[in-house]
């Protein structure tokens, strides 16, 4: 028997599924996948559980109601960030209701979405399904997006539209910026500070690199502008710098880590090529060498056309114009499969990754109704 929406939310929150680069805090997601698979099987879905290669504790779920192509994907990530236990006032794994708010780890980002999606799917008249409804639950979104990358590699997902349940406060979002995080390491030659010619300062070289990056940031802002975003230009942040170990030693190695968030239409591969060319150009000392590496593969920016059926349907059902966000999601990966993505979920992004994360109860029934309406318009 399929639980009520609230009971599904309670059970999902009770299942730890944190993704972390620290093995001590990484929990995998199989418990969530099997719970979802059981409920979706009971409403008549064809179930496919796809383990991630080399990661026995992680899997994706693809559950299909109906058959054919050109259908609608309801997608979410089944993992959460690791719990900061000491900062929570509530038990992170027990849904607690307080003043019409439901507290629990991952409840907004984004386990509640699955319960709402299943509730919407189980009310669908089977004899009216013309295009499939496909619920997808991915693994490892909070770290390397390994689940959705595996989904793309498998190449078996056939749909026209994707609604991704990231926390948007039930406001449709059709575009977001990309994200790339890069490490720049300059190696020089250490020596005593009283004999400058005896060394080659990596810090001096990095100063020139940082000045060039600040200039590039200005050029990017002048060349690219989209009024659809709250911050309408690309952003480039000089995030961390580490170098040297003593005032009287010439710095032999220095690392800078940056975050660059491009607008739709900008390509990560081209930005990485430009970054490397600019760093090489300004180093200015043959005794200095540089290594640039990506801290993670990155997320491309994405933009779904304003007149796409998934966008129009969501705007009509919510009464809100589709907007934009600055954070990255799995949407570009669905776009790479020829599927038009839209973000729409009941949570609030301000609650994502926060202690005492919560979901307003007032979002639950409207969320079910919006998802049911999307299914009716795009699949029946």
Image: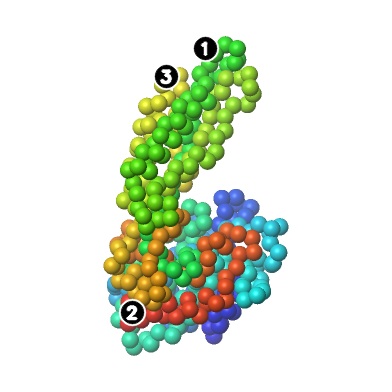
Q: Residue 29 location, x and y as percent? A: 54, 63
Q: Looking at the image, which residue is at 71% across and 64% down?
A: 89
Q: Looking at the image, which residue is at 45% across and 38% down?
A: 293
For the residues labelled 3 and 1, say whether their Cβ atoms are less than 8 Å apart.
no
Q: Distance between the residues labelled 3 and 1?
A: 13 Å
Coloring applied to the structure: rainbow
Label whose residue precedes the other's in the sequence (3 or 1): 1
Pick the residue in front: 49 or 217: 217
Q: Name the residue under label 2.
A: 377
Q: Is mark 3 on a helix, strand or loop?
A: loop
Q: Distance between the residues labelled 2 and 1?
A: 72 Å
Drawn side of residue 45 relative to residue 160, left or right: right
Image depth: mark 3 or mark 1 in front: 1
Q: Looking at the image, which residue is at 57% across and 29% down?
A: 243
For the residues labelled 2 and 1, say whether their Cβ atoms are less than 8 Å apart.
no
Image depth: mark 3 or mark 2 in front: 2
Q: Distance between the residues labelled 3 and 2?
A: 63 Å
Q: Quadrant of the C terminus?
A: bottom left
Q: Is mark 2 on a helix, strand or loop?
A: helix
Dot label at residue 197:
1
Q: How busy is the neighbourhood of tag 1: few (under 14 within 10 Å), some, or many (20 plus)? A: few
Drawn side of residue 242 relative to residue 339, left or right: right
Dot label at residue 256:
none
Q: In this view, does 162 lie above or below 85?
A: below
Q: Is residue 299 visible?
A: no
Q: Is mark 1 on a helix, strand or loop?
A: helix
Q: In this view, does 18 lie above or below 263?
A: below
Q: In this view, does 60 lie above or below 326?
A: below
Q: Residue 32 location, x and y as percent? A: 55, 69
Q: Mark 3 points at which residue?
A: 286
């Amino acid at each position: 028997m399929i639980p009520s929406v609230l009971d599904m939310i309670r059970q999902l929150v009770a299942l730890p599924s944190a993704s972390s680069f620290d093995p001590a805090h990484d929990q995998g997601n199989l418990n969530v996948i099997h719970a979802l698979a059981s409920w979706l099987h009971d409403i008549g879905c064809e179930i496919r559980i796809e383990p991630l290669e080399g990661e026995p504790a992680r899997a994706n779920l693809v559950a299909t109601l109906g058959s054919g192509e050109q259908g609608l994907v309801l997608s979410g990530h089944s993992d959460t960030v690791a719990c900061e236990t000491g900062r929570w006032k509530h038990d992170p794994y027990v849904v607690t209701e307080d003043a019409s708010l439901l507290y629990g780890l991952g409840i907004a980002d984004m386990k509640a979405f699955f319960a709402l999606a299943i509730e919407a799917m189980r009310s669908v008249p089977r004899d009216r399904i013309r295009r499939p409804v496909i619920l997808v639950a991915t693994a490892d979104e909070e770290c390397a997006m390994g689940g959705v990358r595996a989904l793309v590699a498998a190449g078996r997902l056939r749909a026209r539209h994707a609604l991704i349940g990231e926390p948007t406060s039930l406001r449709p979002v059709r575009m977001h910026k990309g994200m790339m995080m890069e490490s720049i390491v300059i190696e020089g030659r250490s020596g005593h500070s009283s004999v400058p010619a005896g060394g080659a300062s990596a810090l001096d070289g990095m100063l020139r690199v940082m000045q060039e990056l600040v200039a590039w940031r200005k050029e990017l802002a002048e060349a690219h502008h989209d009024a659809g975003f709250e911050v309408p230009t690309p952003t480039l942040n000089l995030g961390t710098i580490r170098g040297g170990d003593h005032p009287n030693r010439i710095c032999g190695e220095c690392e800078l880590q940056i975050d660059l968030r491009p607008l739709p239409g900008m390509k990560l591969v081209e930005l990485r090529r430009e970054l490397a060319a600019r760093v090489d150009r300004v180093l200015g000392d043959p005794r200095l060498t540089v290594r640039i590496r990506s801290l993670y593969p990155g997320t491309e920016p994405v933009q779904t056309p304003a007149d796409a059926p998934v966008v129009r349907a969501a705007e009509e059902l919510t009464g809100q114009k589709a907007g934009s966000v600055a954070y990255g999601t799995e949407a570009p990966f669905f776009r790479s499969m020829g599927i038009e993505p839209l973000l729409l979920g009941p949570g609030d992004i301000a609650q994502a990754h926060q202690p005492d994360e919560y979901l307003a109860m007032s979002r639950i029934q409207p969320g079910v109704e919006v998802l049911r309406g999307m299914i009716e318009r795009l699949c029946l």
